[in-house]
Image (spheres, rainbow, N blue to C red):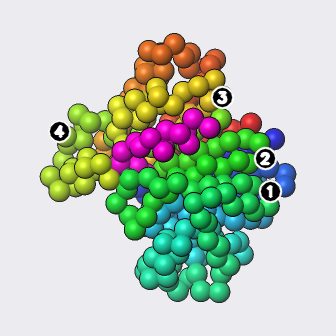
Amino acid sequence: MVKFFSLSSGSNGNCYYIGNEYTGLLIDAGIGPRTIKKRMQEHGLSVNDIEFVLVTHDHIDHIKSLGIVAQRFNVPVYATEKLHRSLDTHFCTRSRLSGCVRKTVLGEESIYKGVKFIPFEVPHDATQTVGYYIDFYGVHFVFITDIGAVTDEIIDYCRRARVLIIEANYDLDMLVNGSYSPLLKNRILNGSGHLSNEQCASAIKRIYNHNLESIFLCHLSENNNPPGIAYKTVASALTQIGVKVGSDVTLAALPRRESSLLYTF
């Protein structure tokens, strides 16, 4: 049985867990080790169940505690070569990662503790941003936590997923009419920022096939995206293509500041 849950999802910190009786991993470490320990315990898990960390990109809300987590939990950090170079100089990680085990993931399959994973580039305004295709003991996950636009390559990877974690960051009307500065609005909207609910829904209509069992909406904006709006937008898109939410596919919006439910596959 493979377990998945979100420890935190949003601009205040991002961290996700996948594991089974053999091994476990985190995707990103944007929250502190005490919070990670507490939220693992909420689901009957231990930090000893974490054996490595995958890094998606070098924004603070994804790596804020990466070095501390790697040190304290004594786990290796996997990232692309370009991201490792950035982590060497980033103020969040440059001192903390010294002495930690670091592994480079290439644009091909890596294997650790029986888990297979492949990074693929996604448009986002970090040094480099990757999504991950993860074959976790036969359960296929695709993670896309920050993304400004959907490419054909992203669609191809997502079509392999049994479990899809994809960004639905903002409601367009709320963002455009909200209090953000023009500069910040442009950064979000310019194709290398974040994905709107409608863009996410449109992508899911292209992605959906009968292998896809669960869709989790992540990185929802606290200011521009109530979870109910994100959920309804994607649910409506699925209904338009004849997919019944709840019977054909599970759909959930992941909470921002607390852990999600624990899901098993």
Left or right: residue 251 compared with residue 195: right
Q: Earlier in the sequence, mark 4 or mark 1?
A: 1
**Do labels 2 and 1 touch, CB within 8 Å?**
yes
* Quadrant position of residue 61: bottom left
Tell me how far mark 2 sits from mark 1, CA to CA. 7 Å
- What's under tag 2, amino acid-wise? Tyr
- What's under tag 3, amino acid-wise? Asn
Q: Quadrant of the N terminus?
A: top right
- Where residue 184 sits in the image (x, y, percent)? 22, 55
Q: Earlier in the sequence, mark 2 or mark 1?
A: 1
- Where residue 119 sits in the image (x, y, percent)? 57, 56
- What's under tag 4, amino acid-wise? Asn
Q: Which sits in the foreground, 11 or 104? A: 104
- Where residue 162 sits in the image (x, y, percent)? 65, 35
Tell me how far mark 3 sits from mark 4, CA to CA. 38 Å
Question: Which residue position holds label 3?
Answer: 211
- Where residue 213 sits in the image (x, y, percent)? 64, 29
Furthest-right residue in this view: 21
Q: Secondary structure at mark 2?
A: loop
Question: Which residue position holds label 1?
Answer: 114
Mark 2 burial class by Cα count in 10 Å: few <14, some 14-19, many 20+:
some
Q: Earlier in the sequence, mark 3 or mark 4?
A: 4
Q: Is residue 203 above or below residue 26?
A: above
Q: Earlier in the sequence, mark 2 or mark 4?
A: 2
The residue lying at 48 percent from left, 72 percent from top is 82
Tell me how far mark 2 sits from mark 3, CA to CA. 16 Å
Tell me how far mark 2 sits from mark 4, CA to CA. 45 Å
Mark 4 burial class by Cα count in 10 Å: few <14, some 14-19, many 20+:
few
The residue lying at 39 percent from left, 26 percent from top is 233
Q: Secondary structure at mark 4?
A: loop
Question: Which residue position holds label 2?
Answer: 137
